[in-house]
Amino acid sequence: MHITFVKKILSSGELCKKCREVSERLESEDLIDSINHIAIADDRDPQSEGVRLAKQYGVTRAPFFLVEVDGETTAFDIYFKFKKFMLEHGIGAASTSSL
């Protein structure tokens, strides 16, 4: 399994609020070590890696995750769907907190 986490940098140069929140959740829910690569979708650079990945996989909001398993890539643009997928594969810790 290979996981790419795509974060968005706003035109102001700051990380988007949701990206910061999801990064914190990855840490607190023991999923951060499962991330193989972090890509940045930079509003100031239409050729940034994250922008290209968003176009390639048809994702319109950030943050998002690309999970490759056995050559098949699935995009998750909702953190809780990503988390559920990971828990179903025995990765991460269950949490009772909600957003």
Image (tube, rainbow, N blue to C red):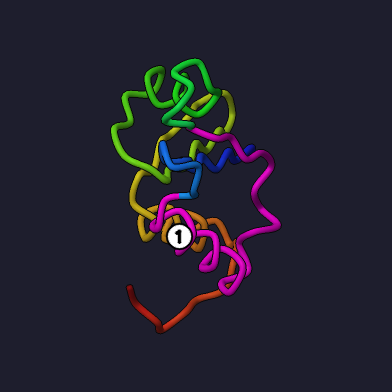
> Image point 43% across, 34% down: which residue?
74
- Magenta-colored stretch includes residue 98: no
- Compared with 44, 24 (above or below) is below
- Compared with 61, 71 (above or below) is above
> Image point 44% across, 24% down: which residue?
51
**Residue 35 located left or right of residue 18:** right
Q: Which residue is mark 1?
A: 83
- Magenta-colored stretch includes residue 26: yes
| Position of residue 99 measured from the top left corner of the image (x, y, whole percent) | 33, 73
User: Would you identify the image quadrant in which residue 85 lies?
Assistant: bottom left
User: How many labels were placed on the picture?
Assistant: 1
Residue type indicated by callout 1: Lys
**Residue 19 located left or right of residue 99:** right
User: Would you identify the image quadrant in which residue 40 lies?
Assistant: top right
User: Would you identify the image quadrant in which residue 32 lies?
Assistant: bottom right
**Residue 27 located left or right of residue 17:** right
| Position of residue 71 measured from the top left corner of the image (x, y, whole percent) | 57, 23
Badge 1 density bin: few <14, some 14–19, many ≥20, Cα 10 Å: many
| Position of residue 34 measured from the top left corner of the image (x, y, whole percent) | 66, 53
**Residue 85 located left or right of residue 48:** left
